[in-house]
Image: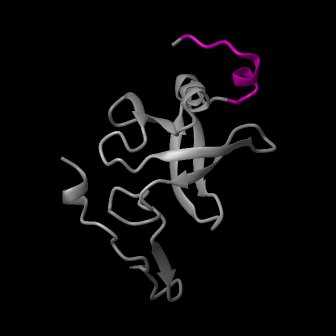
Amino acid sequence: MSISAKWLNKVKWDEHGLVPVIAQEVGSNDVLMFAWMNRDALAKTVELGEAVYWSRSRKKLWHKGEESGHTQKVHDIRLDCDEDVVLLKVEQVGKIACHTGRHSCFFQQFTGDAKNGDWQAVEPVLKDPESIYK
């Protein structure tokens, strides 16, 4: 897809042609996940009304939920003041956004202090990831 829309040119893409994206749940305002988009992913997200990201590990477009069924219906798309971060306000289908089977990818909370601190999982696994992915 070769997209040259003016609205896409306003985004400050990094040296790899990517922009960071935060997915936030409509209603609860929970931050569900962080991902990346290229121009094609953002254009496809607008076209479909569902989140499409750029998978850096697979080096291809990734329609969120293509394997799991846990798609993200996009309600609002915003660009930050520096025009270098995108915020998606989404409805998370199936309530699971994380590949670990949790509602949010941000399930680990820092507890303690700088000397004796650690990360603790504070959100439950809603579904075993092995039953989600083939």
Q: Left of 121 or right of it: where is 92?
A: right
Is most of the magenta stretch helix, strand or loop? loop
Q: What's the magenta region?
A: 2-12
How many numbered discs, if any? 0
Q: Quadrant of residue 107?
A: bottom left
For this rendering, which residue is in front, 124 or 69? 69
Query: Residue farthest to the right?
Result: 81
Residue visible at 73% across and 43% down in the picture: 78
Residue 122 at what x, y percent from top left?
43, 80
Residue 5 sits inside the magenta stretch: yes
Residue 104 at what x, y percent from top left?
47, 64
Residue 126 at what x, y percent from top left?
34, 70
109 lies above or below 93: below
112 lies above or below 6: below
Q: Left of 72 or right of it: where is 131?
A: left
Residue 39 at what x, y percent from top left?
58, 24
> Which color scheme is applied?
one colour
Residue visible at 59% across and 42% down in the picture: 20
For this rendering, which residue is in front, 122 or 73? 73
Q: Left of 86 or right of it: where is 102?
A: left
Residue visible at 44% across and 46% down in the picture: 71
Residue 45 sits inside the magenta stretch: no
Residue visible at 48% across and 36% down in the picture: 53
